[in-house]
Amino acid sequence: MIFLFGSASSLITGCCAPLNILTGNIPRGSNSKYDPDIIVIFDEQPSLDSYTFPGRRSFDMGFTPFPYDFTNEAVEFTFANINYHSDMIVHHFDNGIPWEEALNDSKMGRNILHDLNNRISRTGADKDIYLGVTPLSTYRDQLAGYWGESENMELPDKWKSKSFSDPDIIKAYLNYCRFMIDKFEPKYFAYGIEVNMLGQHDPEAFRDYLVLVENIYNGLKSSYPDLPIFLTIQLETFNNDFEKQKDIIESIIPYTDYIAISSYPFGNFGDPGDIPDDWFSRLYNMAPEKPVAIAETAFLAEDLILEIFNGNTIKGNQDYQIRYLDLLFNQMAGIDCKFITWFVIRDYDQLWLSMEEQGVDEIFKSWRDTGLIDESGNPRLALEYWDKWLSLSE
């Protein structure tokens, strides 16, 4: 999933936050609050009689803290509910790299430290962390922008001509990854997000990217040998152009511990019953010896209409959403799957209004109605289905 509008980071930290988390280190969970008044649960047990559940689950389950609005209330609500409805919190950074500071291994900006400490302080002390970072731009077609006073800034002049294989890029990105790992102490770490899209957009740049990948992977594995380190793969891009993509995937397999999948199949299949049996397995069977992870996914619970697609409607409803969850969870339960991330816990209708006013690309409306909680704060049936799986012991 790709986002503009300052990315999720500025939304999470652009609101009120205690002054004591601006700089330095902060204990995980020190600002995590359990407020039963804002936790969303079903007042009455809904019927899940048509679904069957195993006795145990083998994977972690988590959400990102992407809020439904640019308010402190939305941030508080989001963290409270993802801490309640998961055993893993996903911190997904898609907002540029502090290239200059990382290259020189110097202190990060005050705003960056504020963001990171705020996230850590709001993450439940008992929750595992999946941390994802990327050197790719928002559209996965070039080098990431600069994270300076704000996010995704234009690159400073000295960085504009550098390729992914430039020694300064390699050194800076390795330093940044180590800094983030030491800061968050994650259970899982992705050092590239939806990386196969670069190979689709720019094969020449992707060849340079493979040099970066080899150096970063080997450098990180030497420092953190027990940490799962991987790249995520955009599944729709892979399946929609398999002949070209299979070579791209084969080139990155040596540098990823997991086959980590990003998939939003509602763009291809409105009805989850139309998803082919091999939609996921076609990818993970390319490296059957490696564990699988669902790095990010979601499915529409309401219709989606995009003017950029001539106003055509992609059908969505609560039945489709829960059926997709059922398909996904049961398939992942049958293989060595490590975790599943549902990207957005609550529909972000309010946020989209602000994004639209800012002139954000309409494509970022696509995930607005994929929450397990609707825009009014009401639970969808898929949330109860999710919680049923969450209650199964690992």
Image (cartoon, rainbow, N blue to C red):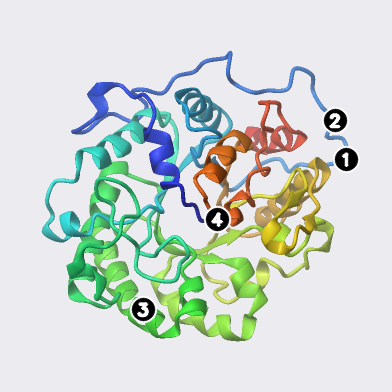
Label 1 vs 3, first from the N-terminus:
1
Query: Horizontal and vertical percent for residue 172?
Result: 20, 63
Question: What secondary structure is found at the residue carrying circle 1?
Answer: loop
Q: Quadrant of the N terminus?
A: bottom right
Question: What secondary structure is found at the residue carrying circle 2?
Answer: loop
What residue would you read off at disc 4? 361
Mark 1 surroundings: few (<14), some (14-19) or many (≥20) residues within 10 A: few
Front label number (1 vs 3): 3
**Vertical placement of 346 versus 149: above or below?**
above
Q: CA distance from mark 1 to mark 2?
A: 8 Å
The amino acid at mark 1 is Ser
- Using the image, tell me which numbered label, if any, was put on residue 210: 3
Query: Horizontal and vertical percent for residue 208?
Result: 33, 81
The amino acid at mark 4 is Asp
Query: Horizontal and vertical percent for residue 42?
Result: 73, 22
Asked if the residue at tag 2 contacts the one at tag 1, i.e. Cβ–Cβ closer than 8 Å, the answer is yes
